[in-house]
Image: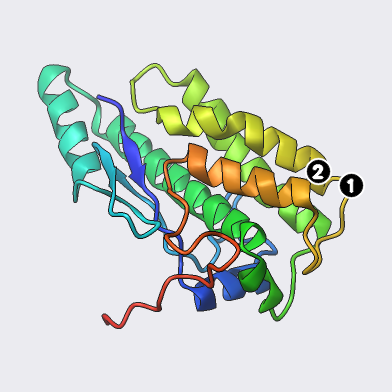
Amino acid sequence: MPIRYSTTIASATALSAALSALAGGCTTRGGGAPAPLESAEPTESRNTNGAGEATGTPDGGTAAAKAAAALTPVDPTQREAMMARTRRHGMATAGFANTMAAFAAPRVIAKAKSLPSREEMLRCIDAYLEVVAETKRSSHGEGNQATLDAEPYALKLRALFATWTPSTTVPDEIQRNARDVIAALGVPEPPEGWDRFEGHAQSSSP
């Protein structure tokens, strides 16, 4: 059963903080801590709530793993590695989506206290492209089709960021592709539109 991700665009504060702390923030096979974003969790399905957020079935990833284990015995070590990979994919996807949201929304990027360097942006995009590569190689059915759908836009963004130094004045082509890649990942445009979007309200829950 395909595992999908629940991807939520972070609050304006988290988006700004993510840009400031992006150095080493996107997880790659070589390591690095996740950026301070609302991470994605594995789910069995994904629905949108109309507020620019995508939701999924709670604990769906665990349910899918249990269902697969019931059909075919899986070595515990292999299962742990599979779930670790799923979590890493979720964090890399959430980090990539939230970072692109900042470049998709003029009002968000304008509030950024600092911006990542070109190299840091490329590292973030490469972390997501690594997820795409691993999804393509997977033979266990845990790949997310949305991950593959977003690949062309991610590749275009990598080419664009390779020749641009990030600033608060985002080129139209980068802004457009950032919006397109988020849509491909299954996250709808905010109700107020990207031009007026300022980030979702900070959660008040502990």
Is residue 198 placed above or below 58 in the rendered structure? below
Q: Report the residue at 35% width, 60% height from top.
A: 51
Q: In the drawing, does residue 200 fall left or right of residue 25?
A: left
Q: Count the labels in the image.
A: 2
Q: In the drawing, does residue 140 fall left or right of residue 133?
A: left
The CA distance from mark 1 to mark 2 is 6 Å
Looking at this view, is 75 or 52 the one in front?
52
Q: Which residue is mark 1?
A: 163
Q: Which mark, residue 84?
A: none
Q: Report the residue at 74% width, 70% height from top.
A: 115
Q: Residues within 10 Å of mark 2 (few under 14, many from 20)?
A: some
Q: Report the residue at 37% width, 37% height from top.
A: 81
Amino acid at dot 2: Leu
Q: Quadrant of residue 116?
A: bottom right
Is residue 35 placed above or below 177 in the rendered structure? below
Amino acid at dot 1: Thr
Q: Quadrant of residue 39?
A: bottom left
Is residue 9 placed above or below 45 in the rendered structure? below
Residue 120 is situated, as x and y percent measured from the top left of the image, at: 74, 57
Q: In the drawing, does residue 25 fall left or right of residue 191?
A: right
Camera sees residue 89: yes
Residue 137 is situated, as x and y percent measured from the top left of the image, at: 50, 19
Q: Which residue is mark 2?
A: 160
Question: Under tag 1, what secondary structure?
Answer: loop
Q: In the drawing, does residue 139 fall left or right of residue 197?
A: left
Q: Quadrant of the C terminus?
A: bottom left
Q: Residues within 10 Å of mark 1 (few under 14, many from 20)?
A: few
Residue 164 is situated, as x and y percent measured from the top left of the image, at: 87, 53
The answer to the question of whether label 1 and label 2 lie on touching residues, with beta carbons closer than 8 A, is: yes
